[in-house]
Image: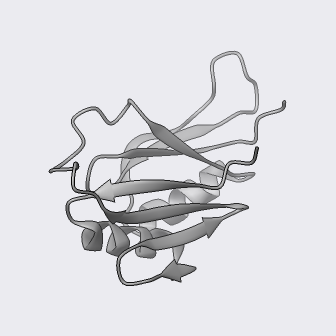
Amino acid sequence: MDFNSILIGSEDPKRLVEYYTRLFGAPAFSDGTYTGWQLGSGFVMVGPHSEVKGKNAAPGRLIWNIESKDVAGDFERLKAAGATVITAPYAYEGQAGSSIATFADPDNNYFQLLTPMAM
């Protein structure tokens, strides 16, 4: 198997498209209903969903991650583009040289920048 993408459902996908376009640039895909940005080999997709209403009441339930070799630099770039900062970069407990930062989108969905994990 190979992970392909994540779809973020929203009652107001236009607002999310505007937000993620500020952060990640022009979408790689848009068909008028769904919009997506390719990050590495995967896609972050945004679109309407009939079962989603309002903001996410439990943003920590599902957090999607973006690996970065320069968390501090990418953190500053996303912050300058208007990203909503939840947590500034900090080190993973017991992982020297690691870094992780958390953001929220306008629907209160969390995503993180993190240093590549050794597997």
* Image coordinates for residue 107, horizontal then vertical, percent: 26, 53
* Image coordinates for residue 50, horizontal then vertical, percent: 22, 56
Question: What residue sits 43% from the left and 35% below the top?
Answer: 62
Question: What residue sits 38% from the left and 30% below the top?
Answer: 61
In terms of depth relative to the viewer, which is nearer, 62 or 72? 62
- Look at the image and tell me in which quarter the N terminus lies: top right
* Image coordinates for residue 103, horizontal then vertical, percent: 42, 47
Q: Is residue 99 depicted above or below 80 in this figure?
A: above
Question: What residue sits 47% from the left and 63% below the top?
Answer: 45
From the viewer's perspective, is 77 left or right of 109? right
Question: What residue sits 39% from the left and 60% below the top?
Answer: 83
User: As drawn, which residue projects farthest toward the top?
Assistant: 94
User: As drawn, which residue projects farthest toward the right?
Assistant: 119
Q: Is residue 27 something one can see in this rendering?
A: no
In terms of depth relative to the viewer, which is nearer, 57 or 53? 53
Q: Is residue 48 depicted above or below 58 in this figure?
A: below
